[in-house]
Amino acid sequence: MSLKKVALIVFLILLVDQVLKVYIKTNFYLRESIQVFGLDWFQIFFVENQGAAWGVELPGKYGKITLSLFRLIIAPVIGYYLYKSVKNNAPKLLVIALSLVFAGAVGNIIDSLIYGSIFSASTPSQIATFMPEGGGYADPLFGKVVDMLYFPFIQDAVWPEWIPFVGGKTFTFFNAIFNIADMAISTGVGILLVFNKRVFPQEEKVTTAQ
């Protein structure tokens, strides 16, 4: 796969990810939700988080800066590995997977790096504005990641009473709220795991008669 095709994949993922995030950020109240096509199990639900993919968080100010710095370190590493893989004619699946992971990582880095500086805060009673007069809601690296895709396929189900700790309690599946960047990362990692032998082909061992 050529570098041009890789760049196109990364660009398109970043474009869709950021356009959707900016639209949600500037048109939705925090925790506002709408059903897509009238479906209960497909919703746009605007939330923000301080953390990594799928809303994973490290608590506190230092947790946030740690995650932001980790992203800034790991993304160039992935990008370099992606570049070398293309140059070395690595398997197509490996290049696609790395492209997805790299694009997703950069997408969430953008949120952390600049969203706090270019947007006002989102609240349940106030929609954020772009480039507010008084400045943004946070310093660089402290911006919150915008999530909005929600697929609660099973809602208000009840755990059987015999299950320890959760018996009798209600639950929702799938309860995570995520974004396009998260999807790209998860898809890329999934390809690496499921197609491991095709992505990382091992050289056949040559045996010689003794």
Image (tube, rainbow, N blue to C red):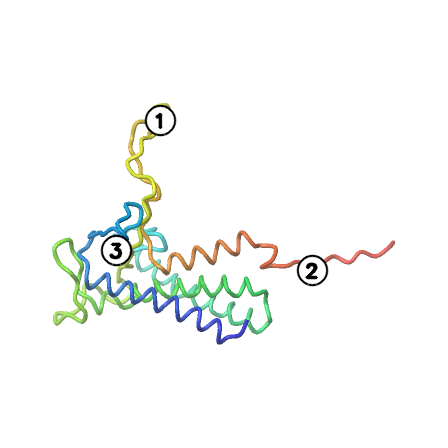
**Up/down of 165 relative to 123, above or below:** above
Q: On the rendered structure, is 203 left or right of 80?
A: right
Residue at 31% in and 54% down? 149
Quarter of the image where the C terminus is located = bottom right
The disc label shown at residue 160, or none: 1
Q: On the rendered structure, is 128 left or right of 182?
A: left
Q: CA distance from mark 3 to mark 1?
A: 32 Å
Q: 112 or 17, which lies in front?
A: 17
Q: Are marks 3 and 2 in contact (CB under 8 Å)?
A: no
Query: Which residue type does callout 3 highlight?
Result: Glu
Q: Which residue is mark 3?
A: 48
Residue at 26% in and 62% down? 143
Q: Which residue is mark 2?
A: 203
Q: Residue 62: x, y in percent? A: 30, 56
Give the mark toward the camera: 3 or 1: 1
Badge 3 crowding class, 10 Å Cα cut-off, few under 14, some 14 to 19, many 20 or more, is: some
Q: 124 or 56, which lies in front?
A: 124
Residue at 25% in and 55% down? 48
The disc label shown at residue 102, or none: none
Q: On the rendered structure, is 20 left or right of 77?
A: left
